[in-house]
Amino acid sequence: MPPQSPPPKFQIFHGHRRPTQNRPTVRGGLFSDRVSQPSRKYPTTVTQSQPFDLSKWDTHLPQSSPSTSSPNPDDTTLLSFLSPIARFILDAFRKNRNHWGPPVVSELRKLRRVTPDLVAEVLKVQNDPVSASKFFHWAGKQKGFKHTYSSYNALAYCLNRSNRFRSADQVPELMDSQGKPPSEKQFEILIRMHSDANRGLRVYYVYEKMKKFGVKPRVFLYNRIMDALAKTGYLDLALSVYDDFRDDGLVEESVTFMILIKGMCKMGRIDEMLQLLERMRANLCKPDVFAYTAMIKVFLSEGNLDGCVRAWEEMKRDRVEADAMAYATLVTGLCKGGRVEKGYELFREMKAKGFLIDRVIYGVLIEGFVADSKVGVACDLLKDLVDSGYRPDLGIYNSLIEGLCNVKRVDKAYKIFRVTVQEGLQPDFATVNPILVFYAETRKVDKFCEMLAQMEKCGFPVIDDLLKFFSFIVGKEDRVTMGLEVFEELKVKGYYSLGIYNTFMEALHKSGKVKKALSLFNETKDVGLQPDSSTYSIAIMCFVEDGDIHEACACYNKIIEMSCVPSIAAYRLLARGLCKIGEIDAVMLLVRDCLASVTSGPLEFKYSLTILHACKSNNAEKVVEVLNEMIQQGCPPDDVVYSAIISGMCKHGTIEEARKIFSNLKEHKILTEANMIVYDEVLIEHMKKKTADLVVSGLKFFGLENKLRAKGCKLLL
């Protein structure tokens, strides 16, 4: 009979048990000789308790149920993988709005100890750099505490996320000061951060710091450094790093060579690139087709077609068979760069080798031949495209329509337009614009109207497309008259809009035909169109150049009544027109209204207000300083600035100080003698006007106006 095990002994606690981290304080109970405290009496209301869910724990609502608490979605995401103590620390930050202070410290002191892994866990999700740094240093002050590499790395990541990358670069010094020399991993983290953000100089700064700490990078990290420098345009620094690479006795990989070769391709240093290719062939291997394709892409991105051809020749020299991607890359680049003949040769090589030719290659070849006025070859390529089983897209059809219209074959272009409609390609304005331009140039208005009717059947917004058409036409000054003739015919048939009128008015104003532009402005009212702010702005400029300032001001008032803002060009011309007739006060009001209404007003308007402020000192030297600063900014004084000088000195200064300013400008050959005489007369007249206004105001104030009228004194009244 086996021996029986003794019965289990029950441990009975007498008094208070010493608490530990895992066991709370016991104050009597079932297995104690102490009498337990009587339970408190609670209300008899019965509530159904919900089980505690740690994932929905909230320090503000410790007993909240899932039905009553609605945590922040960001907090819910964090709760899914953070430990409870990390969540407690983050809640301490959140409750105090990430402000480090005594409340946060008192919350953290409730914890028995914070481990380095816990510090790293908190810093990985903390986005406030100040509170993260304070917490990092607070944790380091614990007795016997030493940060680990993970906590240092988490601090660097946190600082970089908050765009404090310069502070993150100082983490290696912090590690060294705390007896934890940085390893290559810490520098790799910093280099990766800067390279991802395209901060090439900061990458080189970290690399120099690596050498100061005596850390030698691996081949992978060397490649990362050189790649970041080459991509950001610091090729010379990348080559200096490559020299250090070779001095360390490391062996190049194919990636090492390709990083430098692509950097040289980007900078257009073809000779150095060829030398490095020779070194690559001698020390390692020949570049493959993928390497050459990458080189061609870099050359194309910089628009260096000669470099592309040179790289292609080097690929043939190495007897590397080009694939379809290499052919497509070079053909596309050559056609877009204007070397369609060379691209066509490569296209025929592709067909001879049996490569699958993409529709994109056909498209760029057709566009290239159309731009080169070889529409026949483009049409042959279209036939070849259809025979190959492809369906042409709208871009190919648009190119052919434009090319056919350029060679006066609008009948075939119209047939292609019909094909696009039949195939359901949804032709747009770019499809019909060449045909409309041809009909307009040949004065075939009937055909033009037939085309508009066809466009209406296809669902085109005809009026909007006509606005685009006339905007395209008036882009060249020699076509403005032709466009007006077509527009005169279309108006009879009801094809007009306010936008078209504005387009022609602006074009006529630029070409100096102000009278014709004003006639169109008057015509808008006759046809029942309501002018908008753009119409009135153009009319203001036309009236000013025509010398009718009164009508220009009336148009300006119309814009203000509409609660709109004139164009900046209208503000400028109206201000200059008012300056010429001596309305100085009106000019200053216009300047203030412009700067208060637009976001970026003219520079001369801004300096005009500065000059007015400088005139309050009645010191010509201060005004001259403002004028010198204005000239240094590339804004020479004009009529508005001179009006500001006159207005400021007549209000706050004297005629003598104003004349000193004009004399200084004349000495520096900024103001001619004739203009100086004109502005001196305007200065005197404006001073007389201001003096008269002051006298009249004084007479009205003392009630002497009627007595002077009775005596026949009309000089000032």
Image (tube, helix red, strand yellow):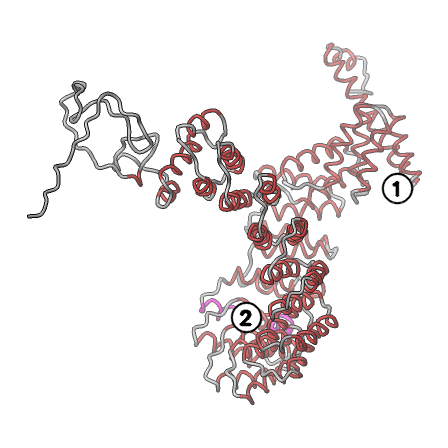
Residue identifier under label 2: 432
- Eyeballing the image, is 485 above or below 604? below
Q: Earlier in the sequence, mark 1 or mark 2?
A: 2
* Few, some or many residues within 10 Å of mark 1 (<14, 14–19, 20+): some
Look at the image and say whether residue 444 sits in the magenta stretch: yes
Residue identifier under label 1: 670
Magenta span covers which residues? 437-458
- Residue at 76%, 11% in the rendered image: 704
| Magenta: main secondary structure | helix
Look at the image and say whether residue 114 sits in the magenta stretch: no
* Few, some or many residues within 10 Å of mark 2 (<14, 14–19, 20+): many
Q: CA distance from mark 1 to mark 2?
A: 53 Å
| Whole-percent x, y for residue 232 in the image | 65, 57
- Residue at 53%, 72% in the rendered image: 395
In the image, 625: left or right of 421?
right
- Residue at 55%, 88% in the rendered image: 353
Q: Are marks 1 and 2 in contact (CB under 8 Å)?
A: no
Q: Amino acid at mark 2?
A: Val
| Whole-percent x, y for residue 276 in the image | 70, 72
